[in-house]
Image (cartoon, rainbow, N blue to C red):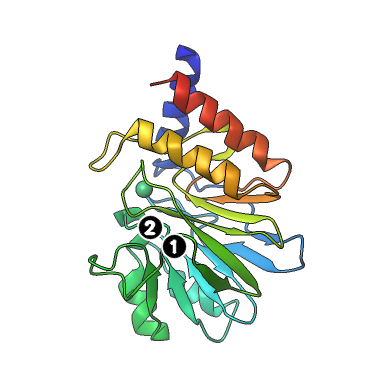
Amino acid sequence: MRQRRGQVRHILHRFATTETPNRYTKAHITPTGGMIQNLAAGQTGMTSNAFLVAGERAVLVDVGSGFDIVSAVREQVDELDGVVLTHTHPDHIGNLDGVIEAFDVDVWGYDTRHDAVDHGLTAGESVRLGDGDYDVVHTPGHKNDHICLYAPESGVLFAGDLVFANGGFGRTDLPEGDRSVLIDSIERLLDRAEGVEQLHTGHGPSVTSSPRRDIERALQAARTGA
Ligand SMILES: [Zn+2]
């Protein structure tokens, strides 16, 4: 299993490269016909992914950092109705001031004590993104205020930095990181996101084919790499 640990480190390192633009697919059609776009696709800097969920309520899931996301949003929609944060690490919220200034939007997140968060989301609550209702799943371990968002109807899951494609999982060596808590969170997510069809993560490519396998591999890797 030592090799897997090495692979995971490599993946995390690759996310942070500033040399080559990421080549992640930008646009995804959800199983229920919605549109989700990764506006950080093609970026070169130290940014997270940032997903625009279009529809009745146009929402950004994370805003990324260090690039002009305002123009990218304007290319897609006239108005933005809100921002939801998977957690408040700098690479996920760096663009927030610009987004708020441009679109006059409020920000939802788990920890209302954080300056960036206007409205709290609690575990088990449902939040509207695009045309879908997403369950809020509190998933600490990478950071205490970390949440995942799962829509039972479409099977779309936003997993933030909890798990990544190909069995990667969030680093736990930063403040508030805790591997055993992360493992509990991945288990809870597998329970809650029973019918997951699409996985959109905080870094790296989305998974649109059997994403449950990727999450199970992440759980296995997190357990054995402790
Ligand atoms: Zn993070």
Q: Secondary structure at mark 1?
A: loop
Q: Is residue 11 left or right of residue 107?
A: right
Distance of label 2 from label 1 (alpha carbons):
5 Å
Residue at 63% across, 64% down:
36
Q: Which amino acid does the dot numbered 1 rest on?
A: Asp
Q: Is residue 196 left or right of residue 96?
A: right
Q: Is residue 141 above or below residue 222?
A: below
Q: In what quadrant of the picture does the C terminus appear?
A: top left
The percent coordinates of residue 87 (x first, y second) are 37, 56
Task: Quickly name the residue at label 1.
Answer: 62
- Confirm or reject: label 2 Cβ below 8 Å from ligand 1: yes
- Tell me the crowding category of disc 1: few under 14, some 14 to 19, or many 20 or more residues within 10 angstroms, Cα based: many
Q: Identify the residue position indicated by label 2 in the image.
A: 92
The answer to whether residue 74 shows anywhere in this view is yes
In this rendering, the answer to whether 40 lies above or below 82 is: above
Mark closest to the chain's N terminus, 2 or 1:
1
Relative placement, left or right, of 178 versus 157 is left
Query: Do tag 2 and tag 1 residues touch (Cβ < 8 Å)?
Result: yes
Q: In the picture shown, does residue 130 fall above or below 36?
A: below
